[in-house]
């Protein structure tokens, strides 16, 4: 009884917060609405990919395909049903569930090859699957070919988007709190040993794919209705890579990491779109500074065994030197005529993702949070560790 | 009826006959040793029994049922569990979590209730956690319950593997070189533990070991393999004096 | 699905396949020594195409260039340009992207490879010509045109019969030209002019019909001269590679490293230099492929995403042949080229890129070792 009431309370709070969010941003522009909606969708996408990639260790790089399957399912559905039905209040949530089912079926189909493939091979197959879906969408009359199809009603259900994100996070977290979830982690760590402990590796992998893709599909449906339009370009391979970057940056396996990285990686490049354009020369000076800083930090992390404080000092120092490099080089480089071309901020979006991936792998392959989850206990142990380090420093 | 029976089990990899027509039977409660020089096919025997490899010919019977070609996880369900020669713990998981994975076979709650974090799933997880903790205590690993298994010492990792295998509550426990890399005290401790496991949990134990003194003092019956073939079988005292065994280990001159 | 066009499509497929084979060799060799799928290989190919493009510009075939006469030397210089660019790119990518991660889990290298590939694609959009698509001028290729080969001639009797109409047509044409002199304009004819025109047109139509009917069963194949050159060059390159791998010290070291990385370093092989060498070798081959692709396949547009599709197809080719296996890569490349053109032949132009993935998935599921490779059993 206590359980039921507590659970009901937390569900109510979650829904209330999501509804409040939508109400709270009512006065903002459409652009902001879209941004907040997309951020929520990316959180769902990243956390659901984390379920496949991070927790179960099945390296999938075609997550956009499930997103696309969901979005197109919603699109086709909207075109088929009677307009009167689609105006009903529960229509979009229902379409979301049906799209999730469609994407789950797709996930099942992709999960099957994962039984026989590992690592890079599986990665390529998931990417190939994504491409096949994209090519089919581009060539089918019913799917609007390269132009896409419009989706009615156009309705930005921001509360539902964020509720979906919360559900996705909650489901992942619940899984990890249970023996079931441990078997998912076990499959990631060692398939042979897992099956020797009686774990049905096949079932675990397929379950992970089905769950992960269902959430991506649901997100797709909300995207379709939120934007009112689906076209193949919205689900190109870049989208898969963006989601992948989020998971990797967050730390594979960490739900907290995926969530935070999704928001960060969505927000920063989006800001860069508005960034005033800069000359190629300026960009080049940034690149040079970045290479310098990364090289120094890499050396420090790999070879230098000083105290935490000294390490941090050197890293901060190198960043300062990097900034100095930029300020010294930007004038002369920008004045070179060949480097005078202006680059728009929007062109740098994907570059940011690419650079993030490479630098991350070089400096901290385990990602921001490694495999940790946010909890008060974890925070405490972190603080304790920091204190101990401090004590260790000779005065 | 024997608990486990290998009937002319043979496995070939390409041209190499790794295990050639090996037959033996284990009775419930046996402490059975499998020895032989390197490359004799001992671990391959384990792999055949646990279903990792299917035998090229011959059959394996467990509890009166033919389990030849049964998938690995099904065999674990039937009640055979093992440790690995080259320690295969779930490295990123803690000791406790490793053992809990072993106890997965006994869980009853559904995945759906786990995903929704419903009371049955919570209660069961709690039970399995406590049970796993008891097992860790029994194997003197309770102090490192929350340590990542990759960070444990070698001897602890070996013991944790045994704990994990025992968590499945098998009828038959296969130990692949459990004493490898241990010092004499640890071996003594292990010796005691294996006996305790057999006596208290009424498990049958089949083990591979290179340390002769360890095997001879622990096992009640021993099978000697060489080049994939059985060369002797019997109680330790007989094996010690078998000329074929001495030849296999020390060369023909000593026989 | 016209069976008469099948031979032509197969020829096109083989020519395209040689390029795929060249790229696939790079994937296979790098996988051989490092067990890493070099995701950025397609982008190296793209850089090679730019190398060839810029070389052609320097030689006077640029947007403002006026040169119209090319020579084999131009082609050779373009080839060298492409190869140099690719070789340099390979050294940089290997040294700064992959080497620091050699002891990390393989997934880390794979993610880096994906990152580098994206970086080159999108970074190129900023730094290389603003990402606008470019073409290598057709004039840069001295070997244009095609050699027609008749696989099966048309009906000779019917052809000869048609030829008998030729004198009549000539007379009608001459008469019409003569008549035009008395007309106001070609488009406003007198009745007499109309009549002559009709006779001429009817005769011409009959002739065309007869010739078409006679040629209904004829099968012709056009061999592009550039394509033949490409095929020849590829064969030479592959022969060199074969010699290098099988009969030189470096080649032996490469094979040793691919069998056992650690053991070879213990045996005194300088593993780092062999890995770099392998990267360079693979990339130089991709460079050669890129130059030929961009020069000899007319209408090729080069942009920074240029390497993606051929890269993926070549990767499929490498897997199809058995990754790590050099003859396998060549075989896989040719099969991929032909398969792709067969899809086009069957009328599914739009799905020509999908076939690569379908083949890839089927191969990985049913014969992960590829045609010439063998799959390994995991040791427990």
Image (cartoon, coloured by chain):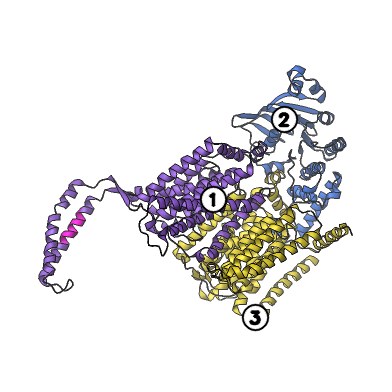
Q: Quadrant of the C terminus of chain A?
A: bottom right
Contact between marks 1 and 3 (CB within 8 A): the answer is: no
Q: Chain of mark 3?
A: A
Residue A144: give x, y in percent of width and height: 46, 67
* Chain displayed in yellow: A
Q: Nearer the viewer, residue C11 or A136?
A: C11
Label 2 secondary element: loop
Q: Is residue B187 magenta?
A: no
Residue C41: give x, y in percent of width and height: 54, 52
Label 1 secondary element: helix
The residue that disc 3 covers is A26
The residue that disc 2 covers is B38
Q: Chain of mark 1?
A: C
Report whether residue A308 is seen: yes
Q: Residue at x 71, y 74 (%)?
A: A17
Q: Chain of mark 2?
A: B
Label 3 secondary element: loop
Residue C266: give x, y in percent of width and height: 68, 37
Q: Which residues are magenta?
A: C202-210
Q: Quadrant of the N terminus of chain A?
A: bottom right
B26 in relation to A85, above or below: above
* Chain displayed in blue: B
Q: Badge 3, how many Cα within 10 Å: few under 14, some, many 20+?
A: few
């Amino acid at each position: 009884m206590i359980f039921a009431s507590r659970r009901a309370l937390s569900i109510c709070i979650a829904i209330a917060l999501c509804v409040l969010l939508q109400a709270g941003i009512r006065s903002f522009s459409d652009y902001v609405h879209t941004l907040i909606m997309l951020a929520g969708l990316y959180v769902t996408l990243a956390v659901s990919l984390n379920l496949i990639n991070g927790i179960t260790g099945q390296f999938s790089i075609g997550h956009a395909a499930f997103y696309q399957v969901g979005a197109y399912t919603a699109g086709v559905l909207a075109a088929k049903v009677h307009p009167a039905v689609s105006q009903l209040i529960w229509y979009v949530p229902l379409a979301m569930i049906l799209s999730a089912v469609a994407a789950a079926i797709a996930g099942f189909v992709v999960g099957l090859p994962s039984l026989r493939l590992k690592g890079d091979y599986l990665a390529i197959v998931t990417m190939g699957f994504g491409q096949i879906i994209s090519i089919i969408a581009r060539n089918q009359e019913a799917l609007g070919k390269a132009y896409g199809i419009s989706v009615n009603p156009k309705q930005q259900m921001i509360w539902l988007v964020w509720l979906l994100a919360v559900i996705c996070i909650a489901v992942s977290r619940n899984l990890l709190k249970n023996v079931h979830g441990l078997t998912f982690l076990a499959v990631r760590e060692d398939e042979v040993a897992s099956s020797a402990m009686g774990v049905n590796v096949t079932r675990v992998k397929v379950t992970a794919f089905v769950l992960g893709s269902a959430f991506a599909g649901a997100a797709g449906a909300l995207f379709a209705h939120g934007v009112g339009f689906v076209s193949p370009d919205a689900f190109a391979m870049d989208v898969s890579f963006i989601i992948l970057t989020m998971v990797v940056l967050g730390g594979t396996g960490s739900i907290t990491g995926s969530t935070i990285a999704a928001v960060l990686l969505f927000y920063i490049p989006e800001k860069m779109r508005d960034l005033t354009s800069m000359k190629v020369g300026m960009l080049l000076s940034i690149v040079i500074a970045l290479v310098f800083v990364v090289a120094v930090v890499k050396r420090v992390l790999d070879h230098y065994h000083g105290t935490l404080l000294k390490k941090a000092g050197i890293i901060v120092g190198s960043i300062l030197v990097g900034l100095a490099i930029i300020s010294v080089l930007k004038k002369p480089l920008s004045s070179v005529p060949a480097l005078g071309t202006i680059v728009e901020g929007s062109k740098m979006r994907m570059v940011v993702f690419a650079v993030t991936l490479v630098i991350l792998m070089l400096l901290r392959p385990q990602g921001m949070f490694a495999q940790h989850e946010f909890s008060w206990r974890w925070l405490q142990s972190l603080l304790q560790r920091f204190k101990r380090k401090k004590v260790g420093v000779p005065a | 009826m024997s608990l486990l029976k290998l009937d002319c089990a043979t496995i070939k990899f390409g041209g190499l006959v790794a295990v050639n027509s090996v037959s033996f039977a284990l009775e419930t409660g046996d402490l059975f040793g499998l020895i032989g020089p390197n490359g004799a096919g001992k671990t391959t025997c384990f792999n055949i029994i646990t279903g990792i490899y299917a035998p090229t010919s011959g059959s394996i019977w467990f509890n009166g049922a033919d389990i030849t070609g049964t998938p690995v996880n099904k065999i674990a369900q039937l009640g055979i569990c093992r440790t690995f020669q080259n320690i295969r713990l779930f490295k990123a998981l803690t000791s406790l979590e490793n053992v809990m994975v072993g106890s997965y076979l006994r869980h009853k709650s559904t995945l759906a209730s786990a995903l929704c974090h419903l009371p049955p799933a919570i209660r069961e997880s709690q039970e399995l956690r406590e049970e796993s903790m008891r097992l860790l205590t029994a194997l003197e690993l309770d102090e490192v319950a929350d340590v990542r298994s990759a960070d444990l010492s070698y001897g602890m990792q070996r013991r944790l593997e045994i704990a994990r295998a025992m968590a499945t509550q098998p009828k038959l426990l296969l130990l692949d070189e459990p004493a490898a890399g241990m010092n004499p005290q640890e071996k003594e401790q292990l010796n005691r533990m294996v006996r305790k496991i057999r006596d208290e949990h009424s498990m049958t134990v089949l083990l591979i070991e290179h340390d002769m003194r360890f095997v001879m003092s622990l096992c009640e019956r021993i099978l000697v393999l060489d080049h994939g073939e059985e060369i002797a079988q019997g109680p330790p005292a007989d094996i010690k004096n078998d000329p074929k065994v001495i030849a296999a280990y020390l060369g023909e001159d000593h026989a | 699905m016209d069976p008469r066009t099948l031979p032509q499509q197969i020829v096109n497929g083989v020519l395209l396949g040689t390029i795929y084979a060249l790229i696939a060799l790079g994937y296979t060799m790098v996988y051989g020594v490092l067990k890493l799928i070099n995701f950025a290989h397609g982008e190296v190919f793209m850089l090679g195409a730019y190398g060839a493009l810029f070389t052609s510009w320097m030689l006077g075939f640029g947007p403002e260039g006026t040169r119209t006469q090319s020579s084999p030397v131009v082609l050779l210089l373009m080839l060298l340009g492409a190869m140099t660019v690719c070789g340099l790119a390979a050294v940089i990518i290997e040294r700064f992207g992959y080497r620091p991660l050699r002891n990390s889990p393989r997934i880390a290298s794979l993610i880096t490879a994906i990152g580098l590939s994206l970086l080159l694609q999108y970074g190129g959009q900023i730094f290389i010509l603003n990402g606008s698509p470019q073409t290598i001028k057709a004039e840069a290729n001295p070997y244009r045109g095609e050699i027609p080969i008749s696989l099966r001639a048309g009906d000779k009797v019917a052809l000869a019969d048609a030829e008998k109409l030729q004198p009549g047509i000539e007379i009608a044409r001459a008469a019409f030209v003569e008549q035009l002199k008395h007309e106001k304009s070609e488009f406003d004819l007198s009745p007499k002019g109309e009549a002559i025109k009709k006779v001429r047109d009817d005769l011409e139509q009959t002739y065309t019909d007869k010739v078409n009917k006679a040629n209904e069963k004829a099968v012709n194949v056009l061999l592009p001269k550039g394509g033949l050159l490409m095929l020849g060059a590829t064969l030479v390159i592959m022969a060199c590679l074969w010699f290098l791998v099988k009969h030189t010290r470096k080649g032996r070291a490469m094979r040793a490293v691919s069998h056992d990385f650690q053991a070879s370093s213990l045996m005194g092989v300088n593993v780092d230099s062999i890995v770099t060498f392998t990267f360079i070798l693979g990339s130089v081959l991709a460079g050669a492929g890129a130059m030929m692709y961009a020069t000899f396949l007319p209408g090729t547009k080069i942009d920074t995403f240029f390497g993606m599709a051929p890269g993926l197809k070549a990767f499929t080719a490498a897997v199809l042949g058995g990754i790590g296996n050099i003859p396998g890569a060549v075989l896989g490349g040719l099969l991929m080229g032909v398969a792709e053109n067969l899809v086009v032949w069957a009328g599914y132009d739009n799905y020509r890129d999908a076939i690569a993935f379908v083949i890839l998935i089927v191969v990985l599921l049913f014969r992960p070792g590829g045609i010439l490779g063998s799959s390994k059993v995991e040791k427990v």
